[in-house]
Image: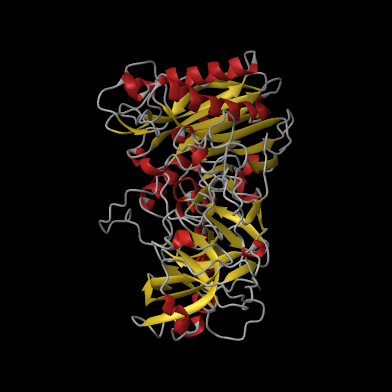
Amino acid sequence: MNNRPPTRIAAAVLGTALALSAFAPAYADAAEITSIEQIQGTGDSSPMLGQDATVRGVVTGAYAEGGLRGFYVQSAGSGVDITSQASSAIFVYAPDEASAVQVGDHVQITGQVSEFYGLTQLKADNVAVLDEPVQSVKPLALTLPSSDADRERFESMLIEPQGDFTVSDNYTLNQYGELSLAMGTSGILPGERLLRQPTDVFKPGSDQAKALAEENEQRAIVVDDGATLNFTTNKNKDIALPYIDAQQRVTVGAEASFIAPVILDYRYDLWRLQPQGQVIGADDADIAVNFEQLESDAPQEVGGNVSVGSFNVLNYFTTTGEMLDGCKYYTDREGNPINVRSGCDARGAATGESFERQQSKIVAALSKFTADVVVLEEIENSARFGQDRDAALANLVNELNDEAGQQVWSYVPTPSVVPADEDVIRTAIIYRAEAVKPIEESVILEDPAFSNARDPLAQAFQRVGGNQNTRFLVVANHFKSKGSNPDDGSGNADTGDGQGAWNEDRVSQAEALVGFADELKELRNTDKVLLAGDFNSYSAEDPMQVLLEAGYVDLGAAADSQSYLYDGLVGSLDHIFASEELAGKVTGQDIWNINAVQSVGYEYSRFNNNITNLFTADQYRSSDHDPVLVGLQLDKKN
């Protein structure tokens, strides 16, 4: 916790001004004063760019450390009634004097007007703290405008943001100390509080998708920490992360309430809300936002007598980096290897100790996941390391049973025929033997369409105590990812329509999957089929349309949340599709938001990355994807 005294302007008392500072020249009183409003002007940049000016005002935010290297100053008495079309505040870049001023000080600054990547500022030559009384600055109650032009009028001013805010992104919270909020609700998707991936709801490249993308930009605002630190660099890892600790999380989807004024700032091409002082730790006095604490100990009830889920286990590898040659690692703040970066076939933990941390979170999550059948993605293909293909899978099931204290879980064994060339990660299926039993052996699809992806794995099940009418088929999937754009003009190049790279291959994989499922319907004597897994495609994208056109129903579309977060936008890459014959037997569905909505800082891979210890052996951030769950009512007579 930061032990500095509170420095908010609300706590400043007029009449406690300091004597004229030793570093300020005596001519301060005689200088010609220019109003801050005149410097700011009404355009994107100052009409006085490059000129020298002297201003007076009240300090509203001061940052002696953390990299901002300056302070904000606002015209005395301004804030409540806005009559000027120009901002009444400006940032003062003063590396040598930033530590000599405090919030509430009446100051006079002489310097050159400049623009710092769109932010009007005064590069100070002289700073004087004045001892004459002055009217305080009142925070402006402001509903944030949606356009850049309208926000310019309030640049660098002290405000009290009005309206409803929802945490929409926390990915860089453990790196740059910043997070994003979504303002209000969507007009295009009525009632939607978060920022939705356009291609999760609208056809890629459509006018609707473009309109939603534009609205997302208008609704987003960054909450910063009053610093420019990169907490992943060695020199900053001993500075406590702002806003979060092991128990106090900032979760995407949580309500955010402002409890103190903030400054409307513009840096690094984004509008930001700066606290009045640098935030250090989760309980700092300068924290201006309160975040709703969301807990989720289990998925929602989905009903039925059989449930099926999908869970990406984030490179669960029992073969650790230390067992292989050539591995390069990501390390903790003491230089200890934590997880594999490159150089070898291992994808997960660097050491046995790190693996135990990774496994503890996955076991905690799967133990609370109420599915009877679980499709897994990103689990080690142990055959690539000279072991039985199911070695890592068997280890995970043993750990789950140890956690349960009895033999609850079993896994679907590798079939007698496997593809000759497989990836180091694979799909797998585990199940609760008291609920379902496998019918015949599993089948792996070997098709050229999956040469750059994981081969689908299928297994037929029947409800324990049921007959053939309760039989159903589950196919585990993990399509080609969107990354590594070939940029070669082919159908796999990223066209910018929102679908990312390798879309053509994912379409081919969806087509091959449909044919595979059709064959298995005959072989396993059931038309009840679930296609589940990480399809690396949002709901309205081309590969998903292939499945919909083949008659499958996207069950996750009825859930009230999404499974993935990327660049501040939520959408579902993880799906469970049901054949028409099975869709009518669905009793409920849920996406269990425990992973994508949490800061990446809680992953095992960020263990000891900062002096703030975020690691706990619980379900939160056990992966980067959220699990999907559906309930089915399978009766003997249907």
* Residue at image point 40% right, 85% down: 47
**Residue 6 quadrant:** bottom right
Q: Name the residue located 35 percent from the left edge and 20 percent from the top edge.
A: 383
Q: From the viewer's side, name the closer residue of 214 and 93.
A: 93
Q: Where is residue 336 in the image (x, y as percent from the top left)?
A: 37, 28
Image quarter of residue 510? top left
- In the image, 259 versus 515, the foreground residue is 259
* Residue 193 in sight from this viewpoint: no
Q: Which colour scheme is used?
A: secondary structure
In the rendered view, would you say 444 is above or below 628? above
- Residue farthest to the top, as pictured: 406
Q: Nearer the viewer, residue 138 or 474?
A: 138
Q: Is 236 on the left-hand or right-hand side of 463?
A: left
Q: Return the x and y of residue 459 as percentages of the image width and height.
A: 52, 27
Q: In which quarter of the image is residue 398?
A: top right
Locate residue 579, reporting x and y percent: 59, 42
Give percent across and percent down for residue 375: 53, 32
In this orientation, does residue 573 appear? yes
Q: How many marks?
A: 0
Q: Where is 213 relative to 465, above or below?
A: below
- Quarter occupied by the C terminus: top right
Task: Determine whether, in the image, residue 493 is placed left or right of residue 143.
Answer: left
Towards the viewer: 462 or 631: 631
Does 372 appear above or below 99? above
Name the quadrant of the N terminus. Answer: top right
